[in-house]
Image (tube, helix red, strand yellow):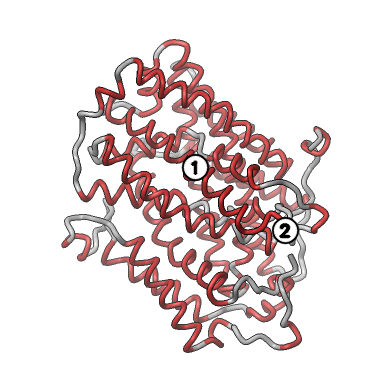
Amino acid sequence: MTRAQLFTLEQQTIEPIPLDARYGKARGLFAIWFGMNMTPLTVVTGATASAVFGLSLWWSLLAIVVGNAIGGVGMALHAAQGPKLAVPQMLQARGQFGSYGASIVVLIAIIMFVGYFSSNLLVASKSVVAVFPSANSAAVIVICSILSLAITAYGYALVRVTTAISTYIVGALVLLSFATLAVKGTIGHVLGLGRFHAVGFFAMLAIGVVWQLTYAPYVSDYSRYMPQETGARGSFWGSYLGCVLSTVLLMTLGVIVGSAVTGTDTMPGLRGLLGGALGFVVLIGFAFSAAAGNSVNAYCSSLCVLTLIETFAQGWRPALRARLATTLVLHLAGALIALAAASSFATSYFNFLNVVLYLLIPWSAVNLVDYYLIRHADYAVDDFFAAGGGRYGRWNTGALAVFVLGVVAQIPFISTTFYTGPIATALGGVDIAWLIGLVVSGLCYIVVARVAPRSIRLEAPAAVNHKAAA
């Protein structure tokens, strides 16, 4: 890719990527998703295991590995859809829920993206203030937002390359941090701290699952540019290994920091443990990566907004100007939320992760079952843009009913600071709602597809019985 191509404004928005515009390899997806997690937010989330739940390093590591490994499978299965359908993931939800029905899931995804965008800004500002105590946190939030806006405005190519760069910069700094903490004896010290308890273990496991699944609504936004010959396998493993390995690595660093500096904010605590010049460079590197990672959230959220608008503005095809306008508005919204955030960020963020999980699990189960087991990747992509939803209609009642049932089924198993269901209470506060939602939604969708196929429009008219355009 030439410099001219890198700094050329992307013209594509939500329509299928033409075959002659496809490029990249599976290792490129690895770099994107490895770099995506090279942010302070990943470290702060990992610190939850030790600082909030009091788990030991080994039990924390087990929960983090198992949770991310499980959630990563679902995330990567979504990524594998990109080279086949060549459209954004949330637009492809029209194939399961109908054009209007999909807008519900799209709206949830937009809220999630903006939430992560704001969270990244907050943690990045704390990283910079930890290095420069006199720095104005509001100014840092604004600067990071402007940097993300500049990257996102150019589109896919620059977002991809910038995120990949953070893989090497922050990745090297993280490995150096582990080595320094080992030499200083910090890792050896925390090995004897903490303990096991079921509530904390399963809560952290659930955090690992949701961390991966929150990427599911937009992994195809990047794999859709991959050539068809890349195939499902390359997209799956590139996304899976990049996202899971980087998450486990940085969350483990967070566990160590959370154990060693209990009661102190994670990023300032990391600087204190590293000390001197290394602590300074590491936190500055993390601040840069937060801005780069935020461009991924902003880019995909703009595609979701365009998808939502296009749903109700039939015949309208969003172009460059529309993408730039939504990108600007979303950055303003995310920055304002970050500036107005309360001091109880950790608690609010943990609750936010849980709520997102409960809503995303049923959507993910329906999408994966429909794509891999029911339709076997056979979608009429043109019908995603057709008036009235084409073969998929405006409302696919069967899929929507399963989605609602999947959300409701989780309620008795929910365990949060603001609500604990009766079964979760009987289990001592252990939260397995994510597992219940996944199983109930997946099995119910299979039953609906067999018993009432017309409710999810499986029987297509011969006139539109064609393969996916991609």
Tell me if 196 is positioned left or right of 11 in this view.
Answer: left
Q: Quadrant of the N terminus?
A: top right
Which residue is under mark 1?
Answer: 337
The mark nearer the N terminus, 1 or 2, is 2
Mark 2: few/some/many CA within 10 Å (<14, 14-19, 20+): some
Is residue 232 visible to us here?
Answer: yes
Tell me if 28 is positioned left or right of 212 in this view.
Answer: right
Q: Position of residue 60 (x, y in %)?
A: 30, 40
**For residue 133, which quarter of the picture?**
top left
386 and 418: which one is in front? 386
Residue at disc 1, secondary structure: helix
* 87 w.r.t. 141: above or below: below
Q: Position of residue 430 (x, y in %)?
A: 23, 55
* 174 w.r.t. 334: above or below: above
Mark 1: few/some/many CA within 10 Å (<14, 14-19, 20+): some
Q: Position of residue 350 (x, y in %)?
A: 35, 46
Residue at 61% over, 53% down? 235
**Pointer 1 with pointer 2, Cβ within 8 A:** no
Is residue 132 visible to us here?
Answer: no
